[in-house]
Amino acid sequence: MKNKEVFISLSISVATVLILSFVCFKINITSGFVCAALGTALIAVFTVYTLRRYRALSRLNDYLSLVCSGNFELDIESNAEGELSILKNNLYKVITRLKTQNEVIEADKVYLADSLADISHQLKTPLTSLMVVSELLEKEQNEEKRKEFVAIINSQCEKMSWLIQTLLKLSKLDAGTAQMNCEELSAREIIENSLSPFLLTLDLKNISVNKDISDFSFKGDKNWSVEAIQNIIKNCIEHTPNGGCLEISTDETTVFKRIVIRDNGCGISKEDLPHIFERFYRGKNSSSESVGIGLALSKAILGKENASLSVSSEEGRKTEFEIKFYKSVI
């Protein structure tokens, strides 16, 4: 036999039956035959059940070998009683979890590859522009033209810097390494800080800002919260025409506190609306400067602060962003 444990057990059992049978034959021939028959029957039963158990263990071993090679398709669930059945069910649970983790890892690989391709594409455009303008600047003698080229270079460098910093922030949030302080923040203060960098742009585009703010406090990180709301305001300004209007309001219910940011710009089409918070997604109404990561960053930041971000829009009329800070998190 290949299995040494079975061979040893069987050898000991046979030897024991032979010795007992010999003793019984010395006492009485009938008792000797009875002892030999019972011993043989017990050995046969033991052998059958032992071999059956080891076959089941062998099947489990073969299945685990297949799992190690990446085959998760076999089902080993069993509802029978016994320790072997419990082992089979526990193995099935572990394998199911491994399968799920394997699928997540594969999805992450695809996502990482897509993200790298998107990042490469986003950086390629300003880099190409920089290379072209640098060559022109090197050959250009006209001082005014040179100043124009330098301005273009500075603009593209600023765009690349913003893009890289935003991508790093997203990566930190994904990896869970972002330093986020949890403190009581004033909604009014956060809104004012978020709005201040855009005052000149609002003035140049003649966009009025209507604020209906009743202050409330919420828990979060000041810098990250300002970053999230700034990206929303920036998106609204980009899609609001000259002479338009930006509205910012706050209110509170028994369940949540919220900030609403609304514009009267070009709006978001119905087909783009479900994808508006996806990274690198650019809808048909996106500006030429948009790269599609600002709103994704806002969503990620607010999610870390146990807040939700949603959007509603009417194409050609308005877009409304709603931030909800829940009073209790389940």
Image (cartoon, rainbow, N blue to C red):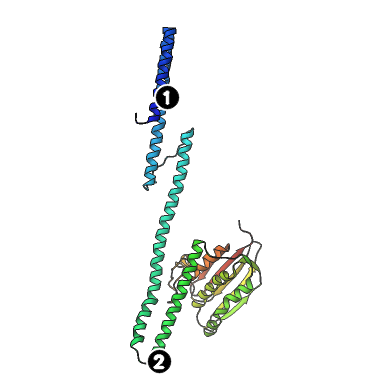
Above or below: residue 150 compared with residue 216 = below
Kind of residue sitting beneath label 2: Glu
User: Where on the picture, by quarter, is residue 188?
Assistant: bottom right
Q: Residue at x 44, y 45 (%)?
A: 95
Q: The N terminus is located in which quarter?
A: top left
> Which numbered circle lies on residue 46?
1
Residue 203 appears at what percent x and percent y? 55, 84
Determine whether, in the image, residue 105 is placed left or right of residue 202: left
Tell whether 274 sits left or right of 328. Answer: left
User: What separation in Å lies between label 2 and label 1 (alpha carbons)?
Assistant: 100 Å
- Against 281, residue 139 (above or below) is below
Quarter of the image where one finds residue 152: bottom left
The image position of residue 212, as x and y in percent, is: 63, 75
Q: In the rendered image, is residue 71 in sight?
A: no
The answer to which of marks 2 and 1 sits earlier in the sequence is 1
In the rendered image of this protein, does residue 177 appear above or below residue 100?
Answer: below
| Disc 1 residue type (three-letter) | Phe
Residue position marked by numbered label 2 in the rendering:
144
Q: Which numbered mark, 2 or 1, is in the foreground of this view? A: 1
The secondary element bearing badge 1 is classed as: helix
Q: Position of residue 309 (x, y in %)?
A: 55, 66
